[in-house]
Image (cartoon, rainbow, N blue to C red):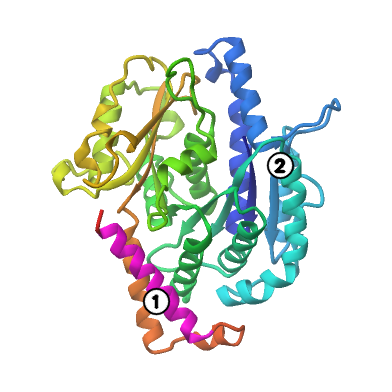
Amino acid sequence: MSVVTLQIGQCGNQVGGQLFAGLIEDTQTKLSQVNVSPKANNDYIEAVYDRFFTCSDKPGNLPEAKAVMVDMEPKAIAQTCYEAKKSGLWKYPENQQFYQKRGSGNNWAHGYKVHGPAAEERIMGMIQKEAEKCDNLSGFMTFMSLAGGTGSGVGTYITQCVKDEFPHAFLLNQVVWPYSMGEVIVQNYNAVLTLSHLYQCADAMLVMENDQLHKICSQLLNIKKIGFKDINKVICHKLMGVLLPALTEKHSGYETSNSLGEMLEHLAPMPDYKLLTIKNIPQMSDTSKVFSTYQWHGLLKHLRQMLIANAAMEEGIDWQVRLEDSRRSLANTLILRGKELDNIDTSHFSDPRLYPSWSLQDTNLSVYRQPRIFSNYDKCATLITNNKSPIVSLNSVIDKAWNMFSSRAYTHQYVKHGLNEEDFVDSFVVLEQVVASYNNL
């Protein structure tokens, strides 16, 4: 089940490039293969390539990422393509890049109302071409930022176009949440406009918050001078924990994979609840891995408390938060990778108290397993959850944007590109409804 990725804006292109590099590196790592048979290892590698790359039968041809790259300036795309080709392991397809010489000026309306419509025909032609290469298209995954103009504005516009063109394909938008202290003065406007519009067309949004990612880099990975490359690596580590192949336990001889469609149908079954987050354990610097050993019981106990206490990482979890006080989940997907996968007790993640009383108890949790070692961890777990955790940040963004809007600060910059004040109000209404729905979980 193939996934076509759309890399939009500087952030989207850098995250996409990092992800594809990580996927290829995972297939090449010898240490990962010691726990599985040669056939199982080959099947796994074949599944990675089938999902994310187009491979030529001609000898010497590098695998090509199933990707379309979009930015209003050429620099990020050129750099990402160069780094891919330089690896000698993979590359981007030729002529599947759209760029111009002028950016969107951190203005959502400029991206959504001007650049998006002007570029629609060419970009959709590239997307159609990439989709036609897939024998079995599962859906599209878009990488984008909420703060700037191109990723948010053009990303939203293109997502709507993809929904119209491929109404039955699954759409997942991975969105990078800006730092709370701010990178861009109008970032909260851009975030509100993006999220409200994506809620109308995407099947789900996978939220990554820069504040949390920064904390992981600092406290878990011991990085002193943290740059966007470090943060992107953390994003991609989380994404790979979700996207690399894994299987359910066999029932009546039948097993299912963690395909994009399979996971989204489970995690986002209702239109009011589309915000997904990822928690993973363990995560540490390479030097620390050598001295660390884990047992599944301990890992899953910590991961469950991370879910209950809404902790972004295992360090500093608040163990005082009780299950009764936790942010209830609509659905959870647990992916276990590594050694000793037999007879692991995951029943604590099925506890009815983790979920609203009106949900179907037997469909709240799905569990996938993969015996192949991931990222040199003998045992690791990834939890994708649809719960209340993003609501605190969402409320903060709404409040900050509303405070600016109430005095009409900077709205003229949006109005001049075709957005009107009613569009702002509509976006606030949509997101207030999202907050209310999650508060009812």
Q: Is 438 a magenta residue?
A: yes
Q: Main secondary structure of the magenta part?
A: helix
Residue 291 % position (x, y): 36, 22
Residue 9 % position (x, y): 62, 61
On screen, residue 346 above or below 51: above
On screen, residue 401 above or below 95: below
- Residue lying at 76% horizontally and 40% vertically, measured from the top left: 133
- Residue lying at 40% horizontally and 70% vertically, measured from the top left: 430
The residue under label 1 is: 401
Please tell me the numbered disc located at residue 84.
Answer: 2
As drawn, is 52 to the left or to the right of 289? right
* Region rendered in magenta: 420-439
- Along the line of sight, which residue is nearer the eye, 373 or 132? 132
Say which amino acid is labelled 2. Answer: Ala
- Residue lying at 38% horizontally and 58% vertically, measured from the top left: 272
Residue 102 visible in the snapshot? no
On screen, residue 95 above or below 36: below
Q: Is 354 a magenta residue?
A: no
On screen, residue 22 above or below 82: above
Residue 393 % position (x, y): 34, 62
Q: Residues within 10 Å of mark 1 (few under 14, many from 20)?
A: many
Examine the image and state in which quarter residue 340 appears: top left
Q: Earlier in the sequence, mark 1 or mark 2?
A: 2
